[in-house]
Image (tube, rainbow, N blue to C red):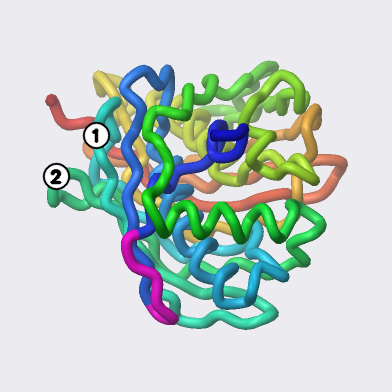
């Protein structure tokens, strides 16, 4: 096996691919150092991307985009297998629209509703013929599990609090040579994955929620619902983004927060998140 599929690829095999539905699976590596829940949404998105790219003869591919809502039911553990599925509601030269989910042992792990990925020329990001060959590999015997080593925790600095309702921080995006995931995302144009940006924003949101009076005694909090996701522009390796989370409301069980990321004076991404108390294992 060559270097493809190794660093930010979350589909091991595609078991069904039709015009309107695609199914597959991915096993979280046993030795992965960190596999945040946001990567389950990445896996569903990658599955939908494979279906849309194949329908459009690998000339264009979806990137970034919008998501109305994502529900998280579990935190994936090393060695667990994600059963992936996506329903393609629209696929043309402008965009792919889909919804999908991942389950673990028959239980819902993540559900994504009303996602839209705008299309851009494939050649800007990868070799079309190499991607075509990768698709045939996935639809055949698949690729070996255990390829992914994990991602580091978000590198946040200069964290500043404004009262009890707002938290700001700087996110330092690694250089391309320092982060293996840029090899897959993407070979011809390195782009910081939107799901890792959302992971950083969610991490900051949890920090702020834990400072709120109703949740100060919570042993652990985790994101359970992300809505109004908009990835507005690409983030290059080495960029520094200004993150901000704002507490909208909180009670003894959960908090709702507004998220934003900015770079060079422009909004890069926005979303809203609900965090809840983590149930004992």
Viewer-side residue, 281 vs 62: 62
Are dots 1 and 2 in contact, CB under 8 Å? yes
- For the point 36% across and 17% down, the residue is 31
Neighbourhood count class around disc 2 (C-alpha, 10 Å): few under 14, some 14–19, many 20 upward: few
Q: Is residue 205 magenta?
A: no
SS for tag 2? loop
Q: Which residues make up the magenta segment?
A: 15-20
Position of the N terminus by quadrant: top right
- For the point 76% across and 27% down, the residue is 176
- For the point 61% across and 61% down, the residue is 132
Neighbourhood count class around disc 1 (C-alpha, 10 Å): few under 14, some 14–19, many 20 upward: some
State how far apart marks 1 and 2 are (Cα).
8 Å
Q: Is residue 249 visible?
A: no
Residue at image mark 1: 80
Residue 105 image label: 2
Residue found farthest to the right = 264
Residue 39 image label: none
Where is residue 181? Give x, y as percent.
Answer: 62, 32
Where is residue 271? Give x, y as percent.
Answer: 54, 52
């Amino acid at each position: 096996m060559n270097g493809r599929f190794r660093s930010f690829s979350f589909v091991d095999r595609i078991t069904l691919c039709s015009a309107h539905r695609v199914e597959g699976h991915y096993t979280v590596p046993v030795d992965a150092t960190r596999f945040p829940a946001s990567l389950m949404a990445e896996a569903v998105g990658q599955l939908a991307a494979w279906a849309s790219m194949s329908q459009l003869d690998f000339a264009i591919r979806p990137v970034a985009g919008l998501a109305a809502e994502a529900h998280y039911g579990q935190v994936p553990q090393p060695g667990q297998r994600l059963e992936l599925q996506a329903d393609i509601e629209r696929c043309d030269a402008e965009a792919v629209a889909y919804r999908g989910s991942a389950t673990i042992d028959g239980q819902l792990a993540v559900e994504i509703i009303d996602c839209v990925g705008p299309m851009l020329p494939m050649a800007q990001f990868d070799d079309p013929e190499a991607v075509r060959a990768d698709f045939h590999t996935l639809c055949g015997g698949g690729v070996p599990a255990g390829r992914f080593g994990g991602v580091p925790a978000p590198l946040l600095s200069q964290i500043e609090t404004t009262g009890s309702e707002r938290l700001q921080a700087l996110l330092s995006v690694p250089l391309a040579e320092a982060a293996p995931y840029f090899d897959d995302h993407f070979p011809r144009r390195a782009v910081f994955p939107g799901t890792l940006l959302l992971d950083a924003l969610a991490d900051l949101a949890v920090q702020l929620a834990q400072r709120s009076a109703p949740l100060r005694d919570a042993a652990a909090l985790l994101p359970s619902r992300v809505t109004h996701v908009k990835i507005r522009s690409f983030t290059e390796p080495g960029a520094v983004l200004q993150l901000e989370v704002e507490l909208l409301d909180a009670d003894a069980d959960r908090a709702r927060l507004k998220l934003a990321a900015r770079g060079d004076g422009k909004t890069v991404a926005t979303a809203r998140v609900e965090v809840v108390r983590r149930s004992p294992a």
